[in-house]
Amino acid sequence: MPYVTIEWFEGRSGEQKQEIAEKVTEVLSEVGGMPPDQVWIRFVDSPKSNWAMGGAIQGGGDGALGPPD
Amino acid sequence: MPYVTIEWFEGRSGEQKQEIAEKVTEVLSEVGGMPPDQVWIRFVDSPKSNWAMGGAIQGGGDGALGPPD
Amino acid sequence: MPYVTIEWFEGRSGEQKQEIAEKVTEVLSEVGGMPPDQVWIRFVDSPKSNWAMGGAIQGGGDGALGPPD
Amino acid sequence: MPYVTIEWFEGRSGEQKQEIAEKVTEVLSEVGGMPPDQVWIRFVDSPKSNWAMGGAIQGGGDGALGPPD
Amino acid sequence: MPYVTIEWFEGRSGEQKQEIAEKVTEVLSEVGGMPPDQVWIRFVDSPKSNWAMGGAIQGGGDGALGPPD
Amino acid sequence: MPYVTIEWFEGRSGEQKQEIAEKVTEVLSEVGGMPPDQVWIRFVDSPKSNWAMGGAIQGGGDGALGPPD
């Protein structure tokens, strides 16, 4: 432990995931006192068509809430 | 918040997801008193071959427990 | 299936949960075509002190994003 | 209930999932006293490129922590 | 990996959890080919009042779907 | 989105959670290009008695894998 799940829109690159994994692991280790090798992270890439915010499925044109693609 | 996850067999259409998202958001807002724009919903479409009920992987022919496809 | 998880701030009553469960089950059954008795819902009540939005742990006084308590 | 989620690297076969589903259902039923038909299991197959352990995205050559593929 | 989550009604003892953890780890190792020390399991004990099946919050008297307490 | 879940042993303070929330939000915003106010984080504090690693429920004396308490 700990086990971290990051659920987001698909579209992030492997380089972004690697950098995020390193930095989140560092934060949990330094602030939370956990051995880095015990930090597991799983990324969950979902299409915008599987997310709704405010009752609206995302990805329908404006992208107001979305990340840069 | 709230964050709602709906895990089910794949196969529902975008129109069904949109209608479900609208209605579930409305229910949470009206009954739970939460601002609609703070309701996030994520759909998780899984193949039947990744679900087991009663020890049996689904999708093997009878479909007794499954949704209409 | 389906399996629905509703993660939110603690504080909703049993009556609210019962009403939400009924209505969400009805929506999934009517719109998604799933047998009502196959709809499972789990509520996850978390203290505001375990949620962060925009980098800020919730519950710290203003409650701008929170539900009525 | 219960609802069991098994998150792992993709690559396990349908036969492995079926055998695991049967045996895990049996264990929960015998040890936990739950009716087998009330045991639901969902497998979540993730590419190694979506897992990090110790700050390192998996699948990068050595596979020290990975399963046989 | 793998990471296993077991969500159920609260009420199981520490001895039951230990026995289930051992046996599920053994199944995943023997059938799935994963090193036992890489199997993480997390139990999530929920009150019946946080589960609904078929639109009904559980624990309201009959207990038809519930485990022995 | 994104929605981040951090599952760990209970015992971290509110100050640690606040600092982790800030830094993880900053990482996701800077590296992933997501608006900070759209980053939601939920901490899940579990007793060691609800975690098993390598088939062994944690917290049983040695604490080899555990965090400082």
Image (cartoon, coloured by chain):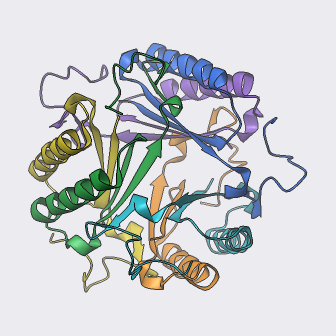
Chain colours: A cyan, B green, C yellow, D blue, E purple, F orange
Residue at image location 70% in from the left, 22% down from the top:
E31
Residue at image location 12% in from the left, 53% down from the top:
C16
Residue at image location 14% in from the left, 21% down from the top:
E62
Instruction: Check the image and report above or below for F24 versus C25.
Output: below
Instruction: Check the image and report above or below for D60 versus B49.
Output: below
Decide if residue E53 is in sight here.
yes
Count the marks: how many? 0
Residue F9: percent from the left, percent from the top?
A: 54, 54
**In the image: residue F29, left or right of residue A55:** right
**In the image: residue A63, left or right of residue F6:** left
- Where residue A51 sits, quadrant-wise, is bottom left
Residue F11: percent from the left, percent from the top?
A: 51, 60
Q: Nearer the viewer, residue A10 or C57?
A: A10
Q: Quadrant of the N terminus of chain D?
A: top left
**In the image: residue E42, left or right of residue B41:** right
Q: Quadrant of the C terminus of chain D?
A: top right
Instruction: Check the image and report above or below for F19 versus B49.
Output: below
Decide if residue C11 is in sight here.
no
Residue B41: percent from the left, percent from the top?
A: 34, 60
Residue E9: percent from the left, percent from the top?
A: 33, 33
- Where residue A26 sits, quadrant-wise, is bottom right
Instruction: Check the image and report above or below for B3 versus F61.
Output: below
Q: Residue furthest right?
A: D62
Residue at image location 58% in from the left, 29% down from the top:
E21
